[in-house]
Amino acid sequence: MIKISFIGGGNMARSILGGLLAEGFHPQQLRVSGPRPSSLEALEAEFGVTTSQDNMSVCAGADVIVLAVKPQVMQSVCEQLCGHIAADTLVISVAAGITCASLSHWLGGQPAIVRAMPNTPALIRAGAAGLFANALVTLEQRALATQILGAVGLACWVEREPLIDAVTAVSGSGPAYFFLFMEAMIAAAQEQGLDAATARALTLQTALGAAKLALSSGDDIGVLRRRVTSPNGTTEQAIKSFEQSDLQGMVSAAMTACRARAEALAQELGA
């Protein structure tokens, strides 16, 4: 029976726990450590999992250790675990910007490490995660990592570690881009006379419908856009305005800035 231990009991750990239980894992297979007793008690009450404030005791005998702590405390957490992780244990990190080399250094050796970059829609099992495995990760461990992250959404593998920073720019930070666009649409709709509730409902349903249509269609996104954009029609005027403001350039610049910050974090916080 696979045993999975979580270091950190915040929102991401909580979402993965819920996904694993929904996929058939038993609470006895899952353990969580964290610094706040109130948070641990809430996890015990909601999921029936074992919790502790002692990271080492939670990790003892684990097949998988999920490091679900903030990047700023990752070094201290790993150094505390150094010497307490079995050679055949898989370590999964969900912290942005912390490289496999840094994790390996802090853990005192060469453990099998998977870097994962999930996103907040994992909270409703609609997440998207990119994964990278170091050379010590076995095929069985890759499948297990896919199962764990796949319990809360889509899990995609990249074959070069620097691409995790690109994943951060696309899906890790991506929900905020769409939230910002939706905020702007809601505000503009209100400026044109719609009440706040109607503007919000129409904007959110439109975003949901567009995403569902894109997922269900085998057509390119550009094809779907052109189908809505009749010549000399209303949509064409909006698209022309976006193009004149260089929307594509703005998106590219924003994602480049996001990736650059992820790379900088690796330098600031790495070994």
Image (cartoon, rainbow, N blue to C red):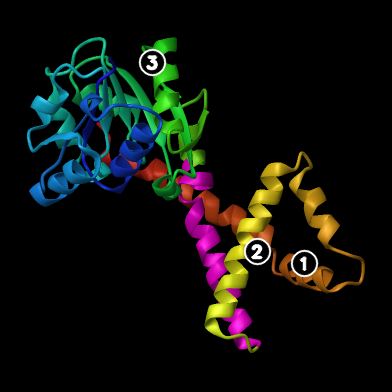
SS label for mark 2: helix
First to last magenta residue range: 168-192
SS label for mark 3: helix
Name the residue that disc number 2 marks.
206
Regarding residue 268, the answer to whether it shows in the image is no
Depth check, mark 1 against mark 2: the one in front is: 2
The residue carrying pointer 3 sits among few (fewer than 14), some (14 to 19) or many (20 or more) residues within 10 Å by Cα, namely: many
Q: Position of residue 258 (x, y in %)?
A: 47, 50
Residue 185 falls within the magenta-colored stretch: yes
SS label for mark 1: helix
Q: Which mark is residue 239?
A: 1
Magenta span: predominant SS is: helix
Q: Amino acid at mark 1?
A: Ile
Q: Residue at x 20, y 37 (%)?
A: 48
Name the residue that disc number 3 marks.
141
Label 3 to label 1: alpha-carbon separation: 46 Å
Q: Position of residue 237 (x, y in %)?
A: 81, 73
